[in-house]
Amino acid sequence: MKSTDKHRKIIRAATKVFAKKGFFNARISDIAKEAKVADGTIYLYFNNKFDILLSVFEQEIGKLIEHVTLLLEKEANSKTKLEIFITNHLEEMKKNRYLAEVIHIELRQTTKIIREYRKNTFNEYLKIVAAIIEQGQEDGTFRKDIQPDIVRQVVFGALDEISSNWHTDNTCPYTIEEVSAQMTSLFQTGLLAPAA
């Protein structure tokens, strides 16, 4: 009989194994060992390794979307919303280094299945940034001559680079608050509509 706890346990184990070994080098037996389950148990929950990787994104990114959406619902100001998104992403990536590594490596290197997944489900997360920019354009806070879809890619690219560096260089002298403030300031200044 399938168990929700076991499913989560396998996802957590897979995230760690993919981060350490890379998707292609990871084996189902590595994931089973990390999750402390029999190899065959993995196949009760997942069809194959790709299915596990997609589930890692589905579950973990789903949590990010849910959490940041709740935070943003409490705020009306588009500038503050951008800061909330940036800070929340940095906090989550600092907290979950394995997820940060999986996002950084696998979204760039894995096959068409993952790239297409990125265009669909992962896109939902990035659309939050575009929606913040669109709101700011509508209320006159942000410039109307910029494309929200380009901004979201630039924002995520910067966030991903910073969180990746945190995990490869443990000597980073800056706190999440300092990095968030700097990034928010840079993006907001570039996005702000000229004073009337």
Image (spheres, rainbow, N blue to C red):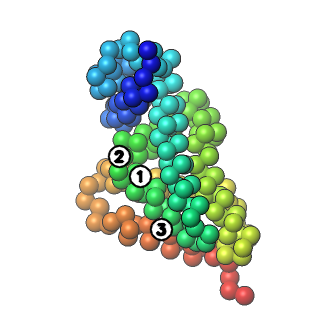
Q: Is residue 94 visible?
A: yes
Residue 48 appears left or right of 141: left
Residue located beneath label 1 in the image: 92
Instruction: Calculate the distance from the C-alpha at mark 1 to the C-alpha at mark 2.
Output: 9 Å
Q: Is residue 177 positioned above or below 66 on the image?
A: below
Q: Nearer the viewer, residue 25 or 139?
A: 139
Location of residue 154 by image quarter: bottom right
Report x, y in % for residue 25: 37, 25
Q: Earlier in the sequence, mark 2 or mark 3?
A: 2
Q: Secondary structure at mark 1?
A: helix
Say what amino acid the circle numbered 3 marks: Met
Q: Are marks 2 and 3 in contact (CB under 8 Å)?
A: no
Q: Residues within 10 Å of mark 2 (few under 14, many from 20)?
A: some
Instruction: Assign a secondary structure to mark 3.
Output: helix
* Foreground: disc 1 or disc 3: 1
Amino acid found under the numbered disc labelled 2: Arg
Q: Is 176 placed left or right of 153 in the picture?
A: left
Identify which residue is drawn at 62% across, 69% down: 76
